[in-house]
């Protein structure tokens, strides 16, 4: 699993990293992005930013919800989850980041340590969201248009 936010002095190479990860047979490699932070414009403003590359990635993807994700203003854990899985494949509308989302992630990692965010939430607060959206065959159908990435 690669975990990329940026490549210093080489953002244009993120597409190359995504292509190399996608070329690994049978989805045995995943392109991972940053924490789920819909209001961080540095992560999606411009075609070479990680969320823009991630939504076009054909293959396994992963993101993580950690303490910073838990503290996004006016966006609870359900909102963060929807940001991680709902969108149109290949398109991230930077005018509406929270509703655009980063499309379907094959894996979504929640904070594994008991440490509260500045909102007082910790990983145990994510359990209800996780239970409401169990991983299964229909996971990819959550992507707008159904079927998820080709």
Image (spheres, grey):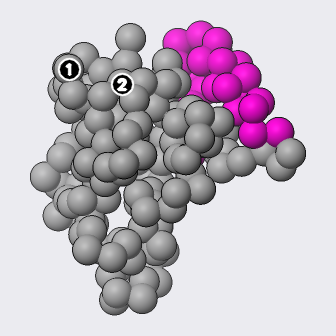
Secondary element at tag 2: loop
Contact, CB < 8 Å: mark 2 with mark 1? yes
Residue 73 is drawn in which quadrant? bottom left
> Where is residue 104 shown, x and y percent of the image?
34, 34
Q: Quadrant of the N terminus?
A: top right
Foreground residue among 103 and 100: 100
Foreground residue among 30 and 19: 19
**Up/down of 19 relative to 34, above or below:** above
Q: Which residues are magenta?
A: 10-33
Identify residue for label 2.
89
Dot 1: within a 10 Å radius of its alpha carbon, few (fewer than 14), some, or many (20 or more) residues? few
Identify residue for label 1.
145
Q: Is residue 20 magenta?
A: yes
> Where is residue 29 shown, x and y percent of the image?
60, 26
| Dominant secondary structure of the residues highlighted in magenta in the image | helix
Q: Is residue 106 left or right of residue 27?
A: left
**Up/down of 59 relative to 36, above or below:** above
Q: Residue at x 17, y 64 (%)?
A: 128
Residue 4 is drawn in which quadrant? top right
């Amino acid at each position: 699993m690669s975990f990329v936010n940026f490549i210093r002095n080489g953002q244009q190479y993120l597409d190359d990293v995504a292509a190399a990860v996608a070329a690994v047979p049978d989805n045995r490699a995943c392109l991972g992005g940053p924490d789920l932070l819909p209001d961080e414009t540095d992560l999606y403003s411009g075609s070479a930013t990680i969320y823009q590359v991630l939504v076009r990635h054909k293959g396994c993807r992963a993101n993580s919800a950690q303490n910073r994700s838990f503290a996004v203003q006016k966006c609870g854990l359900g909102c963060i989850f929807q940001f991680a899985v709902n969108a149109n494949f290949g398109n991230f509308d930077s005018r509406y980041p929270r509703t655009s989302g980063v499309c379907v992630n094959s894996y979504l990692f929640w904070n594994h340590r008991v440490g509260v965010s500045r909102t007082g939430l910790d990983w145990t607060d994510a359990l209800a969201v996780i239970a409401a959206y169990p991983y299964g065959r229909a996971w990819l159908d959550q992507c707008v248009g159904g079927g998820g990435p080709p």
